[in-house]
Image: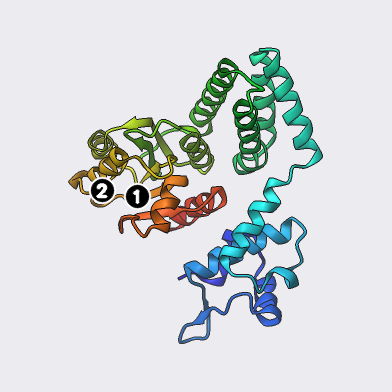
């Protein structure tokens, strides 16, 4: 349960705003303790975070307050998918540079944007739309495999370099281990997650993709992270991937470590009611960032 002070800190909404929204729109109705103080649940916090993001983008609270969490997530995804004029110019510059095999210019543009924005804004508003656009052009044969590979290597290099620059390893900070099990070869989700975690000063241990579950567990035994972040992109997940996931879950080395799963494959398992009980689904970038903030408060 969260106090009104904690919710205010996590969402950026002032206590007066929270009370006004509760009174006028019944956005959430928190429980009360014996002294009448408000106690907010995890579900309350998630909904208020979504409402804070949407009203910050110009949506009227009177229009969105009655929506449930699933509807709010969809509306936020639609809002984030609509590019601004600045985003459009950036995408055009990146694509033009890549068409000319100017990977040096691509790197300059990506670095300049990263320096100018906070990690969450950079990931959500710049990097993710750019990756989606490059992927679309490649699927339509408007970019070659060589160009797509060059761009992927450029993004990987920039993110890992920034992760190393954002923090210094410290025993006083919680750690996060990032990996994808066997047959999962896509790394961008893991890279993005590690950038957000580094931005919040977590110790980040990046293992990458296509690793047997027992090797991930062995690394966790030595590194002792608070959380293992797993990416499952293939939809549905490969049978070997699922086997390796269960090997990781049932390892004694990970018994006391939180397991967070994200990606299309994780959503597939959730929809089929096959997501292992020990695993928590991370729905999107904003949800992951919220979980990072919440975990820090518990440490």
The quarter holding residue 299 reads bottom left
Q: Name the spot of residue 204 as percent of width and height, x first.
A: 42, 36
Q: Is residue 142 left or right of residue 296?
A: right
| Sequence-wise first label, 1 or 2 | 2
Asked if labels 2 and 1 touch by Cβ distance under 8 angstroms, the answer is: yes
| Mark 1 lies on residue | 259
- 286, above or below 42, in the image: above
Residue 31 point in image, percent of width and height? 50, 81
Q: Nearest the camera: 40 or 284?
A: 284
Answer with left or right where residue 290 lies relative to residue 76: left
134 or 138: which is nearer to us?
Answer: 138
What residue lies at 20% left-to-right and 45% top-to-bottom? 251
**Picture disc at residue 57:** none
Going by the picture, which residue comes out furthest to the left?
A: 252
Q: Residue at x 34, y 40 (%)?
A: 238
Q: Position of residue 23 (x, y in %)?
A: 67, 82
Mark 1 to mark 2 CA distance (whole Å):
8 Å
Q: Is residue 38 above or below residue 273?
A: below
Residue that lies at the very extreme toward the front in this rendered image: 140
Q: Quadrant of residue 83?
A: top right
Quarter of the figure with the N terminus: bottom left
Residue ID for mark 2: 249
Say whether residue 8 is visible. no
Instruction: Report helix, strand or loop for mark 2.
Output: helix
Q: Quadrant of residue 230?
A: top left
Residue 249 visible? The answer is yes
Write the residue at 29% across / 37% down: 223
Residue 178 x %, y %: 39, 37
């Amino acid at each position: 349960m969260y106090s009104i002070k904690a919710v205010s800190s996590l969402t950026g909404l002032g206590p007066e705003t929270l009370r006004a929204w509760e009174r006028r729109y019944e956005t959430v109705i928190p429980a009360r303790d014996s002294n009448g103080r408000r106690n907010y649940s995890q579900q309350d916090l998630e909904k208020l975070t979504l409402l804070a993001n949407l009203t910050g983008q110009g949506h009227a609270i009177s229009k969105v307050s009655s929506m449930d969490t699933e509807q709010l997530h969809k509306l936020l995804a639609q809002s984030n998918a609509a590019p601004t004029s600045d985003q459009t110019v950036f995408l055009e510059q990146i694509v033009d540079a890549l068409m000319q095999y100017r990977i040096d210019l691509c790197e300059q543009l990506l670095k300049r944007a990263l320096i100018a924005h906070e990690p969450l804004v950079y990931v959500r508003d710049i990097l993710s739309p750019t990756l989606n656009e490059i992927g679309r052009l490649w699927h339509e044969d408007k970019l070659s495999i060589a160009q797509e590979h060059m761009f992927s290597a450029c993004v990987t290099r920039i993110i890992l370099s920034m992760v190393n620059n954002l923090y210094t390893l410290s025993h006083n900070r919680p750690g996060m281990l990032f990996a994808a099990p066997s047959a999962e070869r896509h790394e961008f989700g893991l890279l993005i997650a590690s950038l957000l975690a580094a931005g919040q000063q977590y110790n980040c241990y990046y293992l990458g993709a296509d690793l047997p579950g027992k090797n991930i567990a062995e690394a966790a035994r030595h590194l002792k992270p608070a959380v293992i972040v797993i990416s499952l992109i293939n939809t549905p997940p490969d049978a070997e991937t699922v086997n390796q996931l269960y090997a990781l879950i049932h390892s004694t080395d990970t018994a006391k470590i939180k397991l967070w799963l994200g990606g299309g494959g994780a959503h597939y398992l959730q929809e089929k009611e096959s997501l292992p009980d020990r695993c928590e689904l991370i729905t999107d970038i904003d949800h992951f960032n919220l979980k990072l903030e919440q975990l820090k408060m518990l440490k």
